């Protein structure tokens, strides 16, 4: 044997040993029998290596068949790593017909034209250079503003469409804090009305308030126009003289497929909103925001599922000794200086595909159609802007049922009712709260809406499952997709009444020639509801009601609602006899799409398994890599044709994540019942299906608030539904991005927001899931969900995650009354639930970009760990040094921090820092495994005193489910109780109004920040015995217990006062 032979031989042996141990470790935990077989194989192979074959200098000298078998076993055993022993749905057993194999749609079916975005195209023309702008004339003033005519100021440029010669300008002071600016074509008729008008029955159009004639006179907004060089306008804040929006120096471009207008912005501006995008909270000044609903896996900085053309603009000023203000244009601020801020909002009510270009000195809107229908909200604070936006423009958010704030568990891959029951049982066995169990598309009969798989999710077993689930206080939410399967006409047994019923009422979109538009989604070739047709809404209601009569679900999860289609155009029209078909891509777990991704740092915590996964991932990527036959790249560039619109390939190409507008979407030329093309309505499909589902649930479950979580949303969708963040990835980066995403949806009026906790795509790991389960416990919508064939990530999979989840859920469930009250206030006043630090402290410019911490309401500050491997986290305590105080949730002690200090906080794995802000009273209730039981437990109150010894708060209580009627009927038919808390002068007062009867007693009151021991304590004039009083000298917390008897009729059955001494409570 040569001397160099052992080196490659040893390398191979070490590789096989390490990877085999990794596989065996996972396999014995979930699949012992295959693991034993695999172990025997490895032993036999090892004996063969050492005894039957002499070492050679050739790396991996074993036969390729053995090596390939090893790789195969590695991948297959990886797929078996599922704690529920899920039936391998990747083989699609329920989607095959009995007379032929399932056809796979070719990948080329979802390939569109090669389009280069205009912002990246070196050949693109700048409309500002070639277009003439407009000139204003015929100015006519009226009590609420003015009207004018705008005419082209020169020859038409027709740069990205056909110029509109004459426009109408309408300016209205609609209220004291809202200004409307509308620019529309002067000639709108039946032929072009859909090009430029957004129907108010789909998206509300604000109109002047009833008292606008008087209130508008006190408006802090002022509109000024000019014809200097070309028409321009500016909006000023009267009180400060600040320019909020100004098109001076730019030209208005208005064509049938392209509208452009721009405004200057101050240096280093602070803009927020313009969703939906995975991005930092502050948008920055070098970012192009595309708004075009897209089915894409949470790609960062691109257009996603929803469309929200609204932004918040906050400007900070430093005040000198004389009170004069100077604009802050730098990120460097002085913690001891005095600042003030002013915020305003801008909403452009336009549903077309569009781009908003944020650049260092300006913002530019580019629209693919429609009109300018802009609203400026004066503020001058974020709460006032958000309230006005919701109350006047998009509607107030839906009031949620109480149970929806419990914990939700879901995954793609729960194979049957038995598996689902095992998940429920496991949560109960480990003592982890579980309120709601969900199913992804696994439950469906051939992936078809409104029908269950007759074997795995049959209705008989489902009735038993749901009966037991509901009896235990839990709930069930199924997914409902947005496309409807078309039965195969050549297969008599391929019946689907949902399609037949909808087709009979004209409920589906068509091609321009009137035939059904047939795309491709999960069940195969599908049609899409036409929500503006006369029959679609009632058809959807009927199907939902009929399905609910067989399966008593408790809410609806609306998916694929951008709407998504897996092919370009009506690809199923000529292929319907091939239905059902497999998508053009491999499902997770199928060959070429084995889930091999892991979180950052997995190679540090699980080196062997990470190395194996990395090697397999590289092999998979290499095998799936496409080769190009040419190095030349040519792009489709559409040139405008006079009098013609090209809706499939508009001359201006927005920076759409999918490129061609028809890729992975309904083609823009799909046609609606009134002739409107999908080009005009694409961004509204998700909005309309949520409206239809809201009405359907009202019919299926009368008198109960509908619970809906949807993927695609538009401005105003929050009045019907909540939203989850879509198909994120199991990475620490996505855990961070969940915070700015949630805060952005607070601005959009959709507070019921959450993400797929622990991540959807890829495999999660113990550390990430530990941190994420704790973070999401403080989001309104709290759900764990992941993809098909990935590792299981339920809260009970890892021991440390069990403990971390219980810790965070214990806090969440104590805070449920507080969270529910926040939603009541949001629903009635337009306030926010999750809040950015800058919104609670508007005069601190150092918080303008803060998005790694957040407030839950005004009183709870959350400072999560967002970095892998960290045991500490840096956090600020806003307002400290200027009158604010914070108390640690766990120790009840006041936090020691200085003004502007970024404090390093201990946060070992399993601990999430949570703080109570002084001057807040937080109502609590003893937690339980389900909210039904928690609502029967005694109450508690935490009064966190300010430095002045005061605190206030409120509590809203009702039956937790009933739909809110009008005010008069509400008081009589659905009694409520709204309690106000006030702490001052060494006393805590609680006074209520309303008729709702809650009989749970008050168990305890905790007062934080009591500087000295107190001996004289009374409750409604009756002395509280010393045995019921505890004062902690270290934490300065006073706890009073034993109040159950004094409140045996209910904690809120009468007003009460708790007095705790006459001495000053806090140090002055």
Image (cartoon, helix red, strand yellow):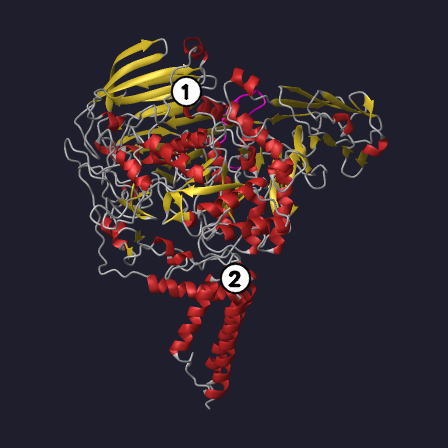
The x and y percentages for residue 1007 are 74, 31
**What SS does tag 1 mark?**
strand
Q: In this view, does 983 lie to the left or right of 589?
A: right
User: Can you tell which mark lies on residue 570?
Assistant: none
- Identify which residue, 923 or 172, lies in the foreground: 923
Mark toward the viewer: 2 or 1: 2
Range of magenta residues: 319-332
Is residue 872 in sight in this rendering? no
How many circles with numbers are drawn on the protein? Answer: 2
User: Hey, which quadrant is residue 135 in on the image?
Assistant: top left
Residue name at image x 18 percent, y 25 percent:
154
Main SS category, magenta section: loop
Is residue 329 part of the magenta span, yes or no?
yes
The x and y percentages for residue 303 are 37, 41
Q: In which quarter of the image is the C terminus?
A: top right
Residue name at image x 61 percent, y 31 percent:
818
Q: Is residue 852 left or right of residue 276?
A: right
- Identify which residue, 596 or 331, lies in the foreground: 596
Residue hosting label 1: 236
Residue hosting label 2: 603
The x and y percentages for residue 464 are 52, 45
Q: In this view, does 193 lie to the left or right of 379?
A: left
Q: Could you tell me how far apart the alpha carbons at marks 2 and 1 are, in whole angstroms?
A: 55 Å
The x and y percentages for residue 529 are 31, 36
- Identify which residue, 414 or 744, lies in the foreground: 414
**What SS does tag 2 mark?**
helix
């Amino acid at each position: 044997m040569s001397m160099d032979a052992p080196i490659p031989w040893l390398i191979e042996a070490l590789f096989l040993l390490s990877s085999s141990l990794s596989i065996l470790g996972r396999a014995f935990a979930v699949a012992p029998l295959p693991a034993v077989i695999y172990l025997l194989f490895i032993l036999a192979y090892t004996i063969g290596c050492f005894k039957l074959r002499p070492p050679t200098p050739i790396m991996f000298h074993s036969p390729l068949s053995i090596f390939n078998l090893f790789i195969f076993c590695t991948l297959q055993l990886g797929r078996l790593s599922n704690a529920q022993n899920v039936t391998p749905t990747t083989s699609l057993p329920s989607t095959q017909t009995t007379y032929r194999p399932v056809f796979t749609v070719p990948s080329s079916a979802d390939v569109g034209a090669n389009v280069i975005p205009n912002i990246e195209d070196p050949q693109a023309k700048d409309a500002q250079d070639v277009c003439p702008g407009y000139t204003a004339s015929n100015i006519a003033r009226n009590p609420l503003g003015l009207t004018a005519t705008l005419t082209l100021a020169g020859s038409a440029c027709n740069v990205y469409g056909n110029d509109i010669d004459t426009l109408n300008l309408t300016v209205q002071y609609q209220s004291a804090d809202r200004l409307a600016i509308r620019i529309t074509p002067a000639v709108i008729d039946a032929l072009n009305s859909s090009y430029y008008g957004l129907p108010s029955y789909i998206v509300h159009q604000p109109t002047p308030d009833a008292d606008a004639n008087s209130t508008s006179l006190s408006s802090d907004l002022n509109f000024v126009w000019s014809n200097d060089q070309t028409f321009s306008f500016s909006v000023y804040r009267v009180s400060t003289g600040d320019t909020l929006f100004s098109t001076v120096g730019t030209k208005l471009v208005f064509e049938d497929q392209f509208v452009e207008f721009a405004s200057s912005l101050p240096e280093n501006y602070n803009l927020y909103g313009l969703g939906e995008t995975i991005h930092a909270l502050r948008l920055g000044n070098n970012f192009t925001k595309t708004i075009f609903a897209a089915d894409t896996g949470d790609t960062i900085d691109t257009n996603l599922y929803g469309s929200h053309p609204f932004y918040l603009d906050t400007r900070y000023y430093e005040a000198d000794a004389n009170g004069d203000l100077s604009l802050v244009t730098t990120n460097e601020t002085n913690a001891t200086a005095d600042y003030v801020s002013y915020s305003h909002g801008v909403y452009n009510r336009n549903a077309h595909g569009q781009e908003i270009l944020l650049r260092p000195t300006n913002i530019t809107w580019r629209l693919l159609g429609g009109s300018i229908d802009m609203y400026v909200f004066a503020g001058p604070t974020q709460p006032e802007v958000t309230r006005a936006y919701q109350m006047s423009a998009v509607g107030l958010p839906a009031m949620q049922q109480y149970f929806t704030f419990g914990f939700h568990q879901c995954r793609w891959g729960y194979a049957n009712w038995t598996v689902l029951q095992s998940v429920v049982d496991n949560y109960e066995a480990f003592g982890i709260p579980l309120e709601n169990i969900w199913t992804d598309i696994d439950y469906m009969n051939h992936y078809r809406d409104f029908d269950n798989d007759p074997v795995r999710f049959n209705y008989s077993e489902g009735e038993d499952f749901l009966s037991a689930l509901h009896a235990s206080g839990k709930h069930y939410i199924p997914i409902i997709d947005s496309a409807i399967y078309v039965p195969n006409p050549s297969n008599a047994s391929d019946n689907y009444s949902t399609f037949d019923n909808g087709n009979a009422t004209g409920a589906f979109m068509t091609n321009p020639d009137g035939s059904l538009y047939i795309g491709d989604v999960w069940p195969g070739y599908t049609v899409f509801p036409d929500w503006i047709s006369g029959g679609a809404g009632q058809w959807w209601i009927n199907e939902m009601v009929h399905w609910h009569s067989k399966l008593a679900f408790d809410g609806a999860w609306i998916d694929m609602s951008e709407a998504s289609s897996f092919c370009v155009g009506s690809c199923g029209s000529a292929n319907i006899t091939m239905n059902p078909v497999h998508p053009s891509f491999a499902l997770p777990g199928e060959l070429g799409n084995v889930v091999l991704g892991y979180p950052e740092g997995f190679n540090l915590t699980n080196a062997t398994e990470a190395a194996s996964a990395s090697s397999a991932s590289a092999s998979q990527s290499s095998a799936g890599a496409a080769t190009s036959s040419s190095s030349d790249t040519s792009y489709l560039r559409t040139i405008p044709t006079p009098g013609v619109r090209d809706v499939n390939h508009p001359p201006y190409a927005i920076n759409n994540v999918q490129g061609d507008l028809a890729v992975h979407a309904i083609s823009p030329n799909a046609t609606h019942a009134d002739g409107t093309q999908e080009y005009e309505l694409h961004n509204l499909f998700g909005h309309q299906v949520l409206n239809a589902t809201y009405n359907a649930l009202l019919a299926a479950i009368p008198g109960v608030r509908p619970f809906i979580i949807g993927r695609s949303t538009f401005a105003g969708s929050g009045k019907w539904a909540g939203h989850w963040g879509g198909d994120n990835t199991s990475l620490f980066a996505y855990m961070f991005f969940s915070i700015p995403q949630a805060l952005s949806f607070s601005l959009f009026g959709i507070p019921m927001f959450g993400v797929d906790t622990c991540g959807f795509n890829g495999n999660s790991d113990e550390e990430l899931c530990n941190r994420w389960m704790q973070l999401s416990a403080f989001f309104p919508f709290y759900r764990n969900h992941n993809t098909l064939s990935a590792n299981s990530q339920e809260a009970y999979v890892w021991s440390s995650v069990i403990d971390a989840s219980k810790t965070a859920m214990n806090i969440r469930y104590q805070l449920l009354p507080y969270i529910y009250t926040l939603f009541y206030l949001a629903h009635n006043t337009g306030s926010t639930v999750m809040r950015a630090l800058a919104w609670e402290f508007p005069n601190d410019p150092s918080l303008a970009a803060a998005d790694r911490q957040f407030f839950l309401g005004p009183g709870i500050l959350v400072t999560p760990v967002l970095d892998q491997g960290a045991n500490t986290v840096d956090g600020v305590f806003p307002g400290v040094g200027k009158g604010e105080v914070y108390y640690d949730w766990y120790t009840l002690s006041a936090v020691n921090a200085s003004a502007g200090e970024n404090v390093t906080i201990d946060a070992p794995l399993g601990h999430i820092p949570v703080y109570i802000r002084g001057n807040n009273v937080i109502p609590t209730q003893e937690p339980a495994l389900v909210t039904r039981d928690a609502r029967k437990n005694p109450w508690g109150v935490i009064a966190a005193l300010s430095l002045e010894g005061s605190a206030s708060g409120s509590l809203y209580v009702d039956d937790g489910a009933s739909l809110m009627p009008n005010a008069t009927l509400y008081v009589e038919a659905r009694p409520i109780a709204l309690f106000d808390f006030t702490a001052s002068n060494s006393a805590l007062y609680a006074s209520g109004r309303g008729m709702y009867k809650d009989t749970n007693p008050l168990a305890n009151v905790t007062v934080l920040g009591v500087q000295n021991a107190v001996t004289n304590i009374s409750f409604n004039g009756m002395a509280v015995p010393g045995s019921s009083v505890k004062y902690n000298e270290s934490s300065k917390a006073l706890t009073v217990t034993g109040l159950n008897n004094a409140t045996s009729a209910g904690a809120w059955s009468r007003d009460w006062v708790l007095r705790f001494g006459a001495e000053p409570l806090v140090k002055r």
